[in-house]
C-alpha cells in the first residue's frame, strides 16, 4: 500500500529559509504601516527567525488578523523588517514580532520600527509597554528594563497557552514606561 503524501499548507508550514531580496543592502529604508499585501513577506521574515528559535512563529491567519498592528521597513519596494504593537489591556501593550532581514541589521532599522510604537502607545493612552524577548541588549537600548515574568499580569499569557516553549520558556520579560 502506498503511503499517503503529507498535506502541507502555507498556513501551517512556515518557511525555514531567509527571503531572497532583490535590492542592494545599501538601499534607503523607510518605515510605514503594514498593508495586507505585506503579509506574505511578514510571514517569511518572522518564521525564518522562528525556525531558528529566535522568536515565536506566526500563522498567516494571525498576521492577516493583526496586520493593522504592524509597522514595516521597506527598501526599494521590498519589506525588509517589521514590528507590531499588541494591546493587551487598558494600560498595557506588548511590542511583538520585531524582525529585520540580516542584510539590513546594524543600521538602526529595528529602532526605527519600534520607536513609532512608543508614539502610538502614547496616542492610545497606554502608559506601559512590555516585551518577551531573547534580544535583551536591543530592548535595553530602547529603554526597556528586565523584570521577573511573574510581575506581568495574567492576561498577557494568553498566547503562551499554545506556545511550544510553554514549559521551557527562555524569553526575558522587559518593561518600559512611555511618557
Image: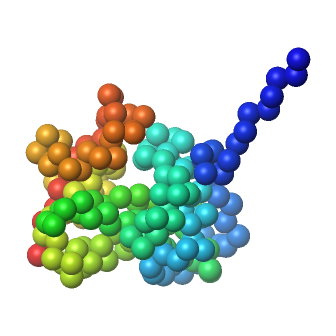
Q: Quadrant of the N terminus?
A: top right
> Residue 88, how many percent across, how many down?
24, 60
Residue found at the far front of this picture: 1
So how many labels did they put on this image? Answer: 0
* Residue 164 drawn above or below residue 84: above
Q: Residue furthest top?
A: 1
Q: Is residue 165 left or right of residue 10?
A: left
- Write the residue at 19% across / 62% down: 89
Q: Is residue 104 visible?
A: no
Percent position (x, y) of residue 109? 43, 70
Rendered location of residue 18, percent (x, y)? 62, 53
Residue 150: give x, y in percent of width and height: 14, 40
Q: Is residue 15 left or right of residue 145?
A: right
Q: Is residue 146 placed above or below 83 in the rendered structure? A: above
82 w.r.t. 167: above or below? below
Q: Residue at x 51, y 65 (%)?
A: 64
Please say whether residue 51 is visible from this viewpoint: yes
- At horizontal 16% and vertical 67% (from top left) the residue drawn is 90
Residue drawn where x is 53% and y is 58% of the image? 61
Image check: 74 left or right of 4? left
Amino acid at each position: 500500500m502506498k503511503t499517503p503524501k503529507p498535506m502541507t499548507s502555507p498556513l501551517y508550514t512556515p518557511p525555514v529559509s531567509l527571503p531572497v531580496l532583490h535590492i542592494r543592502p545599501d538601499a534607503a529604508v523607510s518605515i510605514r504601516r503594514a498593508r495586507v499585501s505585506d503579509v506574505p513577506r511578514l510571514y517569511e521574515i518572522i518564521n525564518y527567525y522562528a525556525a531558528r528559535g529566535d522568536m515565536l512563529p506566526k500563522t498567516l491567519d494571525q498576521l492577516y488578523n493583526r496586520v493593522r498592528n504592524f509597522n514595516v521597513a521597506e527598501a526599494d519596494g521590498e519589506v525588509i523588517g517589521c514590528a507590531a504593537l499588541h494591546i493587551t489591556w487598558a494600560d498595557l501593550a506588548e511590542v511583538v514580532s520585531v524582525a529585520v532581514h540580516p542584510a539590513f541589521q546594524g543600521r538602526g532599522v529595528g529602532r526605527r520600527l519600534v520607536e513609532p510604537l512608543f508614539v502610538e502607545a502614547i496616542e492610545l493612552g497606554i502608559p506601559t509597554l512590555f516585551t518577551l524577548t531573547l534580544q535583551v541588549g536591543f530592548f535595553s537600548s530602547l529603554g526597556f528594563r528586565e523584570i521577573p515574568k511573574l510581575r506581568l499580569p495574567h492576561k498577557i499569557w494568553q498566547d503562551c497557552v499554545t506556545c511550544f516553549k510553554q514549559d521551557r520558556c527562555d524569553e526575558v520579560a522587559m518593561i518600559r514606561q512611555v511618557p
